[in-house]
Amino acid sequence: MRTARTPRPAAPHPAPEPARRRAVVGTCATALAVALTVPVALTASAHRDAQPGAGVVAQPVVQSADGARVALSPLGSYATGVFDQSAAEIVAYHARSQRLFSVNAQAGEVTVLDVATPSAPRKLFALETTGVRAADGSTVPDGAVANSVAVRPDGLGVVAVESPDKVSDGWLVLFDAAGNGQALGAWRVGALPDMVTVTPDGRSAVVANEGEPADDFSVDPEGSVSVVALPDRLPGKKRTPAVRQSAVRTATFHAFEGAALPDGVRVFGPDVAGPNGSLDHRVSRNLEPEYVTVSKDSRTAYVALQEANAVAEVDLRAARTTDLWSLGSKDHSVPGQGIDPSDKDGVAAVREVPVRGLYMPDGIASYTSRGRTYLVTANEGDAREWGDYAEPARVKDLGKGGLAPVCAGSPASGLRGDADLGRLNVTTASGLRADGSCYEQLYAFGGRSFSVWTTDGDLVFDSGDTFEQVTAQALGDAFNTNHSATSFDGRSDDKGPEPENVTIGEVGGRTYAFVGLERAGGVMVYDITRPERSEFVTYVSNRDYSVSVEDAIDDGADPAAALSDAGDLGPEGLTFVAAADSPTHRPLLAVANEVSGTTTLFQVDRLTGRR
């Protein structure tokens, strides 16, 4: 979470339109009602054969729906001993070598783990990502930061590496997953390559070049998506692959500049020049690709643009952005879509409030059901805060310090006390009346949920307030806690449990979404086999909430010891390992936790005799 700054007035900006596609009747509210009618009860970890190993807390939190078909059990964890430094962010798996690759941004490297025994992951070495000569003649310098990793089934792997100054172009480094960690070459890609994935056919790597501004907001590079043609196969041990810069093609957002920008796609804040000093392409500089998923046929990428609250569609054959749409907002005044908006009300009170939530997904995944592709989003939410510009403000501060007030006729105008909406952070860049005089609609960051969408942008299912309802029951005094320290209700005024990322896997012929909760900790599991009938299955957290690591360290505790007691803090990246690829021959879930610096393996067990 970035340090809050005193917000300055934002230029008038139209409220986001609802998703531009048609609403799908009987999906959001109806499907949510089905999910909420399933009773939940505390259960023990399910599989007797899943013996917990290193890094598993004595009593993981487990809360499951009656009749749940699967259970999730922590097996073991690799710990860096590094607290709150992003020492474990993104994780990828290679089946043949039985290795996990965990991005350690703190060390600027990718840690290679032997997970042949999942209860005892063992570090082998770190991948080489600096000092690598790239195809354009540049060399990846010291200080460059590894952000993401992906591995093809044959072992060809790629690492997205950010330039030390962030706003310059980054690199995509090539390696052999079964090798000794030596890089095989690199390509130059766009500014701040934040995420990379390999297409299902293995022919291309797709890179989300986030293009974030400089921290002082002096420079703002363009966001883009690079499509990199990969070698057909890994070379022999004594050969290196032909790595040519011509393999890189980049999809931009230039076609959506000015009046071509679709309604509701958020472009806002100061207009800051790019690295070359140009003010051209304002939309492209404002859009920040966060995460990418690719269709099963490898022809289309879908890109989450978090702060813009939008999704872009990229034709991978042409390396061209072909569509862009707003995700709209959800109505927190509707039953089943409520939130707890206050960290000062003294209770876990999930309720309907006159506020809308911008979905703003971080992670995005895709799958097929009955021959149709669906998108799945983890609706985290994020604000732009760079230099002197700060997008968020608390509701009670609207009307102060040059900010426009809440409109007198708004149902939120009388709810500005701390126990009501006063403490809730909302965007100052959306919701203003057309004349800029007051906020006629308040928009909070994130949906506190996950959603399923069609590739036309239709909302099929949203989990509503279930994440907060389930964690209120499961965590008790740690409801809406932070990740670095345990506190009651501490994140209610921001984004609640904060769903960060999502991965998808099949178990027993059914499809499941695994959603990591960055602040609350743990993983939510939903059965999404029939997207419009998605339902809660289980919630599991390998965290001891009685240990407040930040407070313990402040009191003089050894950080590594406190982390060992606490378990997993701040899940960031997740990957599903199918039974056929698993060293245990049972499905696994790997989770990288950025605050605790741990990479943890869970066993996914099919429960017999369930409905």
Image (spheres, helix red, strand yellow):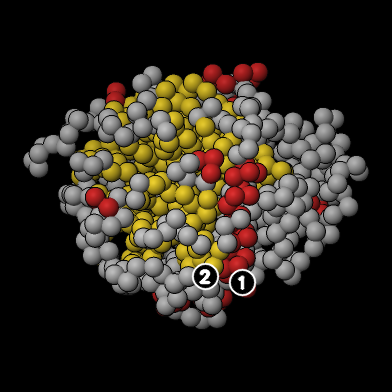
Residue under pointer 2: 42
> Residue furthest toward the right?
408
The earlier-in-sequence mark between 2 and 1 is 2
User: In the rendered image of this protein, does residue 309 appear above or below residue 515?
Assistant: above
Q: Tell me the residue that label 1 is attached to.
A: 476
- The answer to whether residue 67 is left or right of residue 93 is right
Nearer-the-camera pick, 596 or 43: 43
The residue located at (74%, 34%) in the rendering is: 15
Task: Kindly state the secondary structure of the residue where label 1 is placed.
Answer: helix
At horizontal 83% and vertical 48% (from top left) the residue drawn is 412
Look at the image and tell me whether residue 129 can be seen.
Answer: yes
* Label 1 packing within 10 angstroms: few (<14), some (14-19), many (20+): few
Q: Which mark is residue 403?
A: none
> What crowding class fits label 2: few (fewer than 14 Cα within 10 Å), some (14-19), or many (20 or more)?
some
Quick check: 370 above or below 43? Answer: above
Left or right: 26 in relation to 109: right
Instruction: Work out which residue is located at the far bottom of the displayed protein and give it.
Output: 556
Viewer-nearest of discs 2 and 1 = 2
Quadrant into which the C terminus falls? bottom left
Relative image position of residue 589 (x, y in whole percent): 36, 56
Position in image of residue 553 (x %, y %): 51, 76
For residue 114, what is the image quadrant?
A: bottom left
- Give the x, y percent position of residue 461: 57, 41
Q: Give the CA distance from mark 2 to mark 1.
A: 12 Å
- Dividing the image into 4 quarters, which one contains the N terminus? bottom right
Q: Look at label 2 and name its amino acid.
A: Leu
Identify the residue shown where x is 27% and y is 64%. Answer: 118
Task: Please state if 567 lies on the left or on the right of 10 as rendered.
Answer: left
- Callout 1 amino acid: Gly
Find numbered disc 2 in the image and state the secondary structure of the residue it sits on: strand
Q: Nearer the viewer, residue 75 or 211?
A: 75
